[in-house]
Amino acid sequence: MPENHYVLLDRDGVINQDSDDFIKSPEEWMPIDGSLEAIALLNEHDYKVVVITNQSGVARGLFDTAMLEKIHAKMQRMAEEKGGKIDAIYFCPHGPDDHCNCRKPKSGLLEAFARDNHVSLSGMPVIGDSLRDLQSAQAVGASPILVKTGKGCKTLTENSNLNVPTFENLYDAAKYLTSRP
């Protein structure tokens, strides 16, 4: 399998409904229509799916890493019910003022993924709904893709000069990726 057969996904606003109040429990984690099917479609075409997500709610004390693991267990279980598999989840537990290297738009999480899997990020698809998702991808030479779900429409409106492939949702982005030769 070619090493670029990974797709890196942001979580909130791409796979699941986003909330300005944070996703603090498994009950609050609700998939966006078609997103779990998109993961299955990517898997069917030999893509491994990895989630790269900022989770500052941990630093803010809104939930702990044990609760985050429960949220992620629900996400993985629901993806599996649709025939999909999430190979790994990388998350930044820090807040915006912690000056860490892992919080997007910084590239620390992407670099950790590349190190752990001995792959190059060059040209690897990174799908997100916010400018910081796209910036972290661009910082490492990956290929950013924007979806209009979550904060995607706002990102597009506020950054009219964005020159990245843009899709209605994760399923449309997955169809695009899987239809390429």
Image (spheres, rainbow, N blue to C red):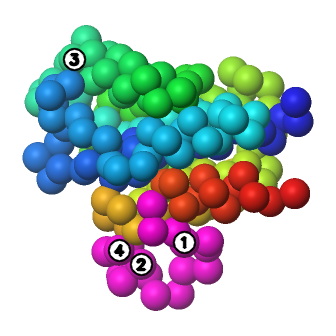
Q: CA distance from mark 1 to mark 2?
A: 9 Å
Residue 101 percent across, percent down from the top left: 49, 39
- The residue where tag 4 is placed is 153
Q: Amino acid at mark 1?
A: Thr
Query: Is residue 87 left or right of 133 when viewed as pictured?
Result: right
Residue at 18% x, 50% y is 19
- Mark closer to the chain start, 1 or 4: 4
Residue at 74% of width from left, 40% of height from top?
A: 45
Distance, label 4 to label 2, CA atoms, is 5 Å
Is residue 127 shown in magenta?
A: no
The residue at which mark 1 appears reads as 166
What element does badge 1 sit on? Answer: strand
Magenta residues? 153-169
Q: Amino acid at mark 3?
A: Met
Q: Label 3 to label 2, Cα distance in Å?
A: 32 Å
Q: Residue at x 31, y 21 (%)?
A: 74
Q: Quadrant of the C terminus?
A: bottom right
Confirm or deny contact between disc 4 and disc 2 (CB under 8 A). Answer: yes
Residue located beneath label 2 in the image: 156
Residues tagged 3 and 1 counted as in contact (Cβ below 8 A): no
Query: Mark 3, residues whose alpha carbon is within 10 Å: few (<14), some, or many (≥20)?
Result: some
Coordinates of residue 43 in the picture (x, y in percent): 66, 34
Task: Give the vertical position of 125 relative to 61 (above or below).
Answer: below
